[in-house]
Image (cartoon, helix red, strand yellow):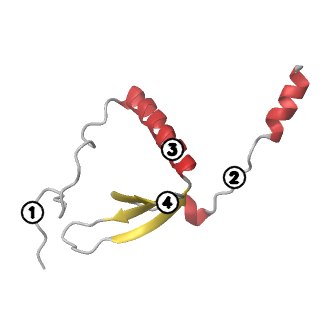
Amino acid sequence: MDEDNKAEKDQKQQINVELSDEIAEGIYSNLAMIAHSNSEFVIDFIRLMPGIPKAKVKSRIIMTPDHAKRLLLALKDNIEKYEKAFGKIEGGMEVPQFPLNFGGTPGEA
């Protein structure tokens, strides 16, 4: 394949991704719960706040098992790159205990 055909093929494979201002702001999540069936994975991103016993699901992503595996590999690759640039991420391996302790003293009203 000559260079012109390769460049044209690469250009055809590009995806134009649109990111609205609202979505670009992002949603903070400090907990994720994952469930699956034989045909899909469901990932709920949750925001848990200190002193508040009720947590809210802020976003739910549903994907195929194939895409879930791709996400796993992409996260692994990005974590490796992050740690190479900024150092090892400490923690993250232990299973959270509920209710979560955010450190410090519990809030009072």
* Residue 49 % position (x, y): 26, 67
Mark 3 vs mark 1: give the one in front. Answer: 3
Residue closest to the eye, 100 or 44: 44
Residue closest to the eye, 69 or 2: 69
Element at badge 3?
Answer: helix
Mark 3 surroundings: few (<14), some (14-19) or many (≥20) residues within 10 A = few
Question: Vertically, is 81 above or below 47?
Answer: above
Residue of label 3: 69
Element at badge 4?
Answer: loop
Residue of label 2: 17
Residue of label 1: 105
> Residue 109 appears in which quarter of the rendering?
bottom left
Q: Amino acid at mark 2?
A: Val
| Earlier sequence position, callout 3 versus callout 1 | 3
Q: Amino acid at mark 1?
A: Thr
Residue sitting at x 63%, y 62%? 20
As measured in the structure, the alpha-carbon distance from the residue carrying label 1 to the one carrying label 2 is: 44 Å
Tag shown at residue 85: none
Element at badge 1?
Answer: loop
Residue sitting at x 74%, y 50%? 16
Q: Residue furthest bottom?
A: 109
* Residue 10 % position (x, y): 79, 33
Mark 1 vs mark 2: give the one in front. Answer: 2
Mark 4 vs mark 2: give the one in front. Answer: 2
Element at badge 2?
Answer: loop
Residue of label 4: 26
As measured in the structure, the alpha-carbon distance from the residue carrying label 4 to the one carrying label 3 is: 23 Å
As measured in the structure, the alpha-carbon distance from the residue carrying label 2 to the one carrying label 3 is: 21 Å
